[in-house]
Image: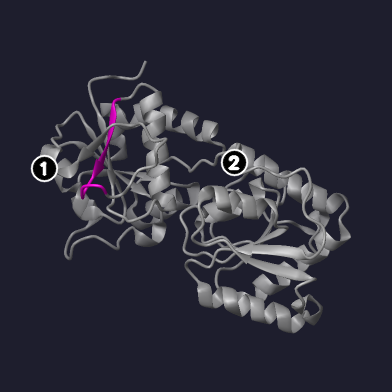
Amino acid sequence: MPPSTFTTYVFLPPMAKISGGLAVLLQVAEHLDRGGFPVRVVRREGGRPALPEWFQVPVMEWGRLQLDGDDVWLVPEGWANALAPGLRAGAKCVVYVQNWAYLFSSLPQGVSWRDLAVSFLAVSRPVSWFIEQALGRSSLVVRPGINRSLFRPPDRKPDGPLRVAFMPRKNKALADLIRDLFSARNPEFGLADQMIWIDIQGRSHAEVAELLTHSHIFLATGFPEGFSLPPLEAMACGCLPVGFAGFGGWEYMTPINEEGGGDQEPWRPWFPVPENPWPGNGFWVPDADAMAAVLALEQAARLLRNQGPKLEQALHAGQLTADAFALEAQREQVLAVWPKITSSKAWARLT
């Protein structure tokens, strides 16, 4: 049984919509609650964010927050000022780094992470490596999870033109450039009966899953990323993903090599990439390299046109990858990590 002498308080930034990062915070809180760990989510402003109906974890408003030294105060990395109540109370303050690029973005001028009594939790192994390189600090890892009953492959993809889904949330200009370059190099795909581009930005989870289920390729244009969830959701829905990893995507991304269907030498980054048991699951290229993304998109289109065992292997690798990041796997990870966070000896080592 988990210890009951402490409570975990999860700070929810006052955002208008449930972003991917907020959704992960809710998932962590729900896993703790169902696992028997006392937990509360804390909102900075009344009513924001609006929580989904399925979320049953107790909610507390900021003004009622009273922490003590036995409590855990979990705050995402972009909201350093929200650490103040935990630091004042001597609570076990945990900074959940969901995007490496924002680790230093909210620190007040003249304040260093080395000056603060905090521990770090990383959303992926690449982010954990980044924290260690930047601060010389170790961190535990809790990864996102996807709902495999929602994000699942169809019995059959639609016939007809290739359907390319994309989400240009962070880099719309690059997404437009990739489309223009691809059309210039491949005029036969300029007609709607040959290729359809599907923008899935701003859709609900159910709508995204439905559109991905009816798409053949997913073009990943997001960076920087702490994990890069959309390509994983696309894999789960039977898409062949192409594009940028955002650094954090290397948690699960493995390049398709020549034996797996590619006709170019797969690119690998200079930094250490975590090892995974599945074969190549996508055509991955350097962040912001539009031409490399176009060439990878051409590879994916040829693989889908030719069908055959190489495509089957790549899509099967995508399913193996998605299964490894199911909500059940995330729950096991949360429940394994939390006793280490709450243990005084483990806390001393982490801080």
Type of residue at label 2?
A: Leu
| Residue to which mark 2 is pinned | 150
- Does dot 2 land on a helix, a strand or a loop? loop
Q: Quadrant of the N terminus?
A: top left
Q: Is residue 320 magenta?
A: no
204 on left or right of 61: right
Residue 197 visible in the current orientation? yes
Type of residue at label 1?
A: Arg
64 on left or right of 49: left
Cβ atoms at labels 2 and 1 below 8 Å apart = no
Q: Which residues are magenta?
A: 38-47
> Vertically, is 158 above or below 138?
below
* Residue at mark 2 to residue at mark 1: CA–CA distance: 42 Å
Residue 210 at x, y = what percent?
63, 50
Label 2 vs 1, first from the N-terminus: 1
Of residues 246 and 64, the one drawn nearer to the viewer in this rendering: 64
Which residue lies at the image location 34% right of the left edge and 51% below the top edge?
A: 136
Which residue lies at the image location 61% right of the left edge and 45% below the top edge?
A: 275
Furthest residue to the top? Answer: 1
| Residue to which mark 1 is pinned | 88
